[in-house]
Image (spheres, rainbow, N blue to C red):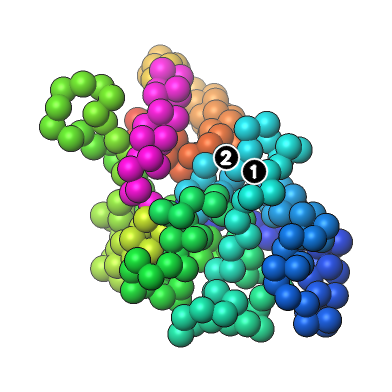
Amino acid sequence: MKHIPNIANEESLKALHRAKKRSMEWGEFSHGPDGHELRLNKAREQKGMCGYCECLLTDEGITEFKEERHLDHFYPRNKGVEAKPQLQYDWDNLILSCSREDCCGKYKDSDKHNILPSQIINPRHEDPRDFITFVVEEDGRSFENRRYVSAVAREDVGEEKRRRAQDTIDALNLNYKPLRVARRNALWLEQDKVEMYQEMCATEDDVEVIRELLSEYEDELESKEFSSTLLSYAHSKWGEIT
Ligand SMILES: [Zn+2]
């Protein structure tokens, strides 16, 4: 989960405004052409990734966007004590999520936990990386494929932030097993390269050169699926170098 910078699209803003004025049914809007465009624009804003788990929402990038992706209302439009129907057509309240039932937007809105949206981190307004980090865990067996990457509350923050981190992890079920496995697979693909950069830094004396190298590589990681996991691993490897 990472911060989503606001890159509102003017056409979609107008479409949302029109739908609100006409008191349109959400389902009608969402499944119509404006809803389709909104999904595309939200996917662009989120670099093609689920706004909660950071899985890639498409196989081929946003051009071959799949309609079944879930347009999530951070504050639900009609369900629960924190429902905010007035924010139904609010760009800022909409986050594009994967459509898994057992994590992310749909899980957040389910009856499977008692955590309210106001208790969790809103990635549009806060940086989840200030709260949550990732650790490699093993299930006690020695095979490599028994490792998982789990989301955990950061230890270097206060009690209040740790509590919100844990509520967020639980409300979005960020440690749903398929997610932990997918993060591990993403990490495997990048591990050698992270170590290569680590070695390069160890043999380079010029701090400015090192900073530049790492910053370019970090930009590359930022555009990848599960980027928060990859970056937290990279930082753990070269924490003191920079
Ligand atoms: Zn997701």
Any magenta on residue 171?
A: no
Quadrant in the picture for residue 18: bottom right
Q: Which mark is residue 140?
A: none
| Residue that appears at 72% across and 63% down | 30
Residue 242 can be seen, yes or no: no
Picture coordinates of residue 78 (x, y %)? Answer: 57, 80
Quadrant of the image occupied by residue 3: bottom right
Q: Is residue 176 magenta?
A: yes
Using the image, tell me which numbered label, if any, was put on residue 56: 2
Q: Position of residue 119 (x, y in %)?
A: 40, 73
**Contact, mark 1 vs mark 2 (Cβ under 8 Å):** yes
Q: Amino acid at mark 2?
A: Leu
Residue where numbered disc 1 is placed:
48
Determine whether the residue tagged by mark 2 lies in a helix, strand or loop: loop
Circle 1: residue type:
Gly
Tell me, yes or no, if residue 24 can be seen here.
yes
The quadrant of the rendering that contains the C terminus is top left
Residue in front for this viewpoint, 189 or 102: 102
Residue numbers of the magenta segment: 174-194
